[in-house]
Image (spheres, coloured by chain):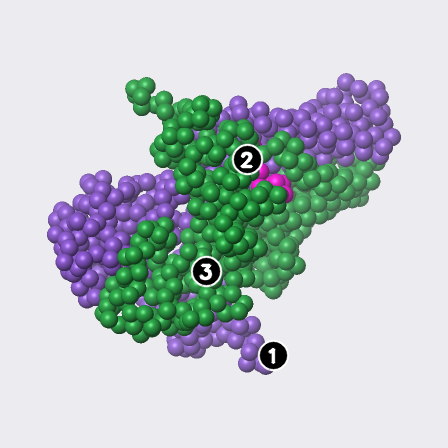
Chain colours: A green, B purple
Amino acid sequence: MTPQDTSPDQRLEDLLPRLVSENDAAGIEQLIEKHSTGELARAVGRLDDEERGKLIDLIDAEVAADLLEQLPVVQAVQLLEEAEPDQAAAVVDELPSDLQADLLADLDDEDAEAILSHMLPAEALAARQLKAYADDEAGGLMVTELLRYPEQWTVHEVVADLQAGADEYRDYQIQYAYVCTQQGQLLGVLRLRDLLLGDRSRVIRDIMIPNPLSVSDHLRLDELHGFFQQHHFLGVPVISDDGLLVGVVQRADVDQAWIERQDRSMLRRQGIVSGEEIRSMPLWERASGRLSWLSLNIVLNLMAASIISHFEATLAAAIALTAFLPIISDMSGCSGNQSVAVSIRELMLGIVNTKDVFQVWLKEISIGLINGLAVGALLGAIAWFWKGNMVLGMVVGGALFLNTLVAVSIGGIVPLILRRLGRDPAVASGPLLTTVTDMCGFFLVLSLASQFIDYLK
Amino acid sequence: MTPQDTSPDQRLEDLLPRLVSENDAAGIEQLIEKHSTGELARAVGRLDDEERGKLIDLIDAEVAADLLEQLPVVQAVQLLEEAEPDQAAAVVDELPSDLQADLLADLDDEDAEAILSHMLPAEALAARQLKAYADDEAGGLMVTELLRYPEQWTVHEVVADLQAGADEYRDYQIQYAYVCTQQGQLLGVLRLRDLLLGDRSRVIRDIMIPNPLSVSDHLRLDELHGFFQQHHFLGVPVISDDGLLVGVVQRADVDQAWIERQDRSMLRRQGIVSGEEIRSMPLWERASGRLSWLSLNIVLNLMAASIISHFEATLAAAIALTAFLPIISDMSGCSGNQSVAVSIRELMLGIVNTKDVFQVWLKEISIGLINGLAVGALLGAIAWFWKGNMVLGMVVGGALFLNTLVAVSIGGIVPLILRRLGRDPAVASGPLLTTVTDMCGFFLVLSLASQFIDYLK
């Protein structure tokens, strides 16, 4: 490799701050053009707040919008936050309407207001309306850039408009055009291919697909996801409460939102309860976000530990047991988590719903019997030979067997119940499972040990 | 609600097996038409093997293909497995090529061969070629149903072909047509809108976008995902090693594959190591799949437990400590998992890469200092007041503080190192983290306790 080959890529993270400090707008724009999404995200992640603001202020609003479209939303928000409001407004103006809504909703109210006040009144009004939608309903996911034509137009007139507006429409994701009444009610959908194949003198009302499927602007993301699984469309028109066509939700945007929702859910499940953390966020925000989860877990852990404390006399008499307490806690957690994972997946796929508690329990308890017997016998045998005490082996193995039954039952059922209560099963299932199985596991092994304490000393 | 309103939906899972046992093909086809993806998935999940086979054998191949397209791949495979090979072949023939490749690759070799042998030779050959691709490379994700035209054709000729082939092309996801040489090399892309707006007498070579971006048939899913993040296309042409246009990868299919990959990764992380389990799989397959993970974890847990055993004398002298061992293990696990989650997310977004070990560690250790101090002080204070022993509080709190530093360091860095080694960080990070932090945590608290054992008795 020659130095020319390798240096630009390897040092993008050094080059970008240097160009920012040198106010080299053209250089930065070239970098953005040349580098991939991932490389840009990494280099932007290394900038400090001041550099982030300056980056956006320096470059052309259209290029900045290109950059923001490529970056993760959380980074795009960080960039807009630090930019001057007038430049930020110019950049937001260049973005597609769904991303506008996302970013404005994620900004602090103060920052969002500052940007909106620098936009043209009509555009600010439109942006405010979109911002009012939740980001996981059709209104928050739709784009408002769409082609709509009056029913009495001919194919020829539509094609002429497409020709005249080619520049404006270039960035539209045009797969369909929509046929509306004067009042804005949706009458039908025109596929581009129908326009292409249709006689140019025909009225579009006659070649459109009438009474097309549409969705309410308040339809939730999971319902939209289901809709696009069932139908092969690339987009679906969105109708407001008063029956007007207000936008189009694209399949690609629903998929994107679904991926982000899974990412957030994964973060939450692992204890990033806000659902969002990247390491360029302020230290204090990151630390306190994580701490809230840790504090909750200390409390839950203390509840489980109180069971152990209650049996201190037993433990003192059979000290070899102590090494097995964390094992029983962890192994039950493993079994329970497997059941949680399968339940969450089946819920997501729609294979089970919240009414299937009994069926799920039956399926889980069968596995629990097999695997509980296997791990119980294994751990029991190990305990027996390691500590040279058969009764110890039976106590430890028996407790693990019984607690595995508890763990798979709770793990299988709890996600269904949480979903029925309207909670996210991915987040709350873990701590609930761990606390109950810990308490139950400690109680089982220690109360069994108390019964047979004479053989354990 | 009248009975007519509610009964059909509530009892789909009862109705479907009844219609199957009554050989009521028309009734089943109506049900499939009428119900949503999720409802169908749930009802199919309740069928036993025999019913699943009969369902597919009974109904029209085209309707069966519609059904399979809606179901999760794992369910679709279960259905094909149980159907008669000739009917299965007819169904597979109706599927888009990317789903054909998926299903045939996921079937047992024997079942796949039986189906292929019932297909027409040309179609079987095409399906075999697709099946040879991995399901996470462009060749396995592409569809081969695409529009290709010779460079010298006019817009008029293309439109005439579209008109003539309207029936065949109905199911194609046509956004682009491809302009090729006689030998099949890709020269350019025609957008449907260019055809629409272009003069019909023009040669398509003159209005196509020349030298379009394309991808190799061996491009990996993560690279394709990056490609579609960077470019606003709905599809990208796929080129084989010998330079020929072999298919098109659609954005929607890449998004779908990405979502499934995340699902599998979530399952693996939670101990479903095969990456796939639904409860209609055979009990033994499910139990043994889960058991492999449990066995590994028993071994890892025993390693950690051996540390506790080593300090039995200390524990016997300070029995109050035992209640705190699982707390230190669990709390360090929590802190470490938070760091793992953020690292995996940043890797996915491209904000960090495998070279950023030191930067990540710096960011994590700062949080570790703050949160370690917080949880250490909290647990220490609780231990002091609960057990009435200040030294016990200092030992427990100090150990948790130190082990939090260990946990966030390992949690932050290990995913980067695993990725560099080409492993999936989502799967291996958890057990690695837990084992090391458990061992380290037990060692810290027990060796500290040994030092101050006179104050703990």
Q: Is residue A213 visible?
A: yes
| Residue positioned 68% across, 40% down in the render | A293
Q: Is residue A271 magenta?
A: yes
Q: Amino acid at mark 3?
A: Gly
* Residue A76 visible (yes or no): no
> How far, Cα to Cα, is label 1 from label 3?
34 Å
Q: Position of residue B33 (x, y in %)?
A: 42, 71
Please, what secondary structure does the residue beneath circle 2 have?
Answer: helix
Alpha carbon distance from label 3 to label 2: 30 Å
Residue drawn at x 54%, y 47% is A116
Residue at the spot x=36%, y=63% of the render? Answer: A177
Residue at left offset 27%, top offset 45% = B238
**Chain to which the residue tagged by mark 2 belongs:** A
Q: Which residue is mark 2?
A: A82
Q: Residue furthest toward the right?
A: B388
Q: Amino acid at mark 1?
A: Met
User: Is disc 3 in contact with disc 2, using a CB cutoff of under 8 Å?
Assistant: no
The residue closer to the viewer here, A401 or A410, is: A410
- Say whether disc 3 or disc 2 marks the residue closer to the N-terminus: 2
Q: Which mark is residue B105?
A: none
Residue A247 is marked as: 3
Q: Which part of the image, by quadrant, shows the C terminus of chain A? A: top right
Q: Nearer the viewer, mark 2 or mark 1?
A: 2
- What is the x, y in percent for residue A40? 43, 33
Chain letter for mark 3: A
